[in-house]
Image (cartoon, grey):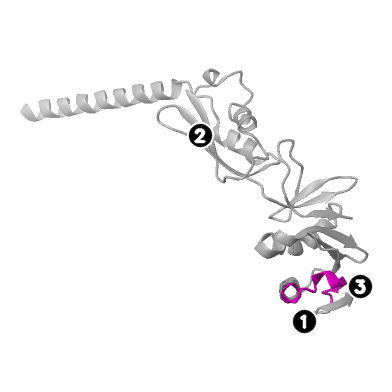
Amino acid sequence: MKRSVGYIKAFVLVAVICFLYGFAEKRHKGREITEVKVRFTDSENLYVTEEVVNKLLIQNKASVSSIDKETLDLNRVESLLNKHDMIENAEVYLTLDGKLKAEVSQRKPIGRVIGSSSFYLDRKGEVMPLSPFYSARVPLMFGFNEASIIKAYPIVQYIKNDEFLTRHITGIQRLKGDKYKLELREMDFDVFFGDSSNVALKFNNFKAFYKKAQIDKKLDTYKRVNLQFGDQVVCTKK
């Protein structure tokens, strides 16, 4: 008899716990979202604003208070963010206190095409539209279109990852046969790079030449610097 009473008490206890858990879960899901928080993972200027991200997060609802946790589709919201032209990656989640949070990584432009159609080349080698909110300070690229830009990607990427080159190179011009000419800040000589082969070798040779000519105070005596010949720099004086 005592054993039966014990079983009954245990059953009742489990039933009560299940009821309370289900009630709490239903109440939790039914609560409305109290706040939307957006965090950009880097400190660079914004090519997409917090306001734009907020609108995507609340899925075009009139306000945050009109969304409840039960109807919110986190996967759909995250997918909407990741499809945005200016966003590289986004992660969306809900906190226990009812806040909808998003961590957003922007796409990073490394070059800007100037021409009949203007756009960025991003760090992954993909075409990126210009932003209405901010213009990136990257080398300007002339004579390119969306089909030809990818061939110059190794050159632009190398410039972006090198402090010296980023400081001195302001433009890249596409020549016939997918060869390139570089424009320098405050220097009036032309730099013929050739095609996009042997990028590291050519740039290392150029940096060695530049620093030596700067020490010798001869930078302003040249009108052309040619890097097309692999392991040597061929210079033409004025």
| Badge 1 amino acid | Asp
Q: Give coordinates of residue 170: x percent, y percent.
A: 78, 57
Do labels 2 and 3 touch, CB within 8 Å? no
The residue located at (83%, 69%) in the rendering is 220
Asked which quadrant contains residue 61, the reply is top right
Residue type at mark 3? Answer: Lys
- Residue denoted by label 1: 231
Q: Is residue 54 above or below residue 39?
A: above
Task: Rate crowding at label 3 as few (under 14), some (14 to 19) or many (20 or more) other CA atoms within 10 Å.
Answer: few
Kindly give the residue lying farthest to the bottom in the view shown: 231
Circle nearer the N terminus (2, 3): 2
Q: Residue under circle 3?
A: 238
Q: CA distance from mark 2 to mark 3?
A: 60 Å
Instruction: For marks 1 and 2, give the one nearer the viewer.
Output: 1
Q: Nearer the viewer, mark 2 or mark 3?
A: 3
User: Element under label 3?
Assistant: loop
Tell which circle, 1 or 2, labels the residue nearer the N-terminal end. Answer: 2
The residues tagged by marks 1 and 3 sit, at their Cα atoms, a distance apart of 23 Å
Mark 1 and mark 2 in contact? Answer it, CB < 8 Å: no
Q: Residue furthest front?
A: 217
What's under tag 2, amino acid-wise? Answer: Lys
Q: Is residue 202 above or below residue 91?
A: below
Q: Is residue 168 rendered magenta in the image? A: no
Q: Rate crowding at label 2 as few (under 14), some (14 to 19) or many (20 or more) other CA atoms within 10 Å.
A: some
Q: Which stretch did the figure color magenta?
A: 212-228
Where on the picture, by quarter, is residue 149?
bottom right
Q: Which residue is mark 2?
A: 101
Q: Residue at x 64, y 24 (%)?
A: 60
Q: Secondary structure at mark 1?
A: loop
Q: Position of residue 206 (x, y in %)?
A: 76, 73
Q: Quadrant of the N terminus?
A: top left
